[in-house]
Amino acid sequence: MANSLNTITVDGVTYNSAAYEATQTKETKKNDDLGKETFLQLLVTQLQNQDPLDPQDNSSYIAELAQFSSLEQMTNVAKSLEDLGKVVGNIDTSVLVGQLSSMIGMNIDWVLTVNESDAEGNPISHTEPKTGVVTGVTIVEGNPSVVIESEGQKYMVDISNIGHVYNPGEEAAVPESVAE
């Protein structure tokens, strides 16, 4: 006798699972995830095709349904957390841009990294201290930067390179530890 899990009876005709699949037209979905509808179809098919003389215990169906519900809820929570992370990131960037916007018109000291090549073509870099005036704020590849005008040129400066911000007309304040 064939294993009842490997056979399907439709309209009185018994097929093995491979032969039955071959007779069915398949619609392929972009999403290969097992969805609610698919799960319920599988459950109903299982119930319809179980051996009436040896029915499966109802508790196993309930356990499968509970596991599926738990998985669905965890998936929903993960998606919600991902969406929330994007919102928080956007809020953080917006707040930072707002704070940086208050620097427009202020004097600023920063460090410019210059990448060059030596006589043999080997890359070398050095830093130069710069002073300028903040003329704008921008976001480059998701990172907020300030636009600084210095000596007739404009620079986009990452906020990590900013050393000091001070009001127009003020001299850059030298920390006491450096002055001594």
Image (cartoon, rainbow, N blue to C red):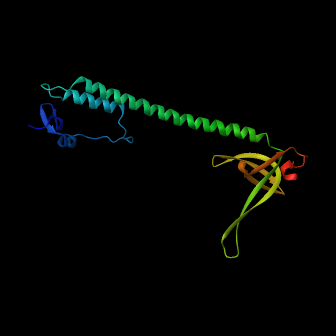
Residue 38: % across, % down: 32, 33
Residue 143: % across, % down: 66, 47
Residue at the (23%, 30%) spot, across then down: 45
Towards the viewer: 118 or 103:
118
Towards the viewer: 1 or 138:
1
Residue 86: % across, % down: 57, 38
Image quadrant for the N terminus? top left
Counting the numbered discs, the total is 0
Outermost residue, left side: 1
Outermost residue, front side: 180
Q: Quarter-wise, where is residue 87 in the image?
A: top right
Outermost residue, right side: 169
Position of 78 compared to 127: left or right?
Answer: left
Residue at the (81%, 56%) spot, across then down: 130
Residue at the (54%, 35%) spot, across then down: 83
Q: In this view, does 80 lie above or below 117?
A: above
Residue 107: % across, % down: 84, 48
Towards the viewer: 93 or 120:
120
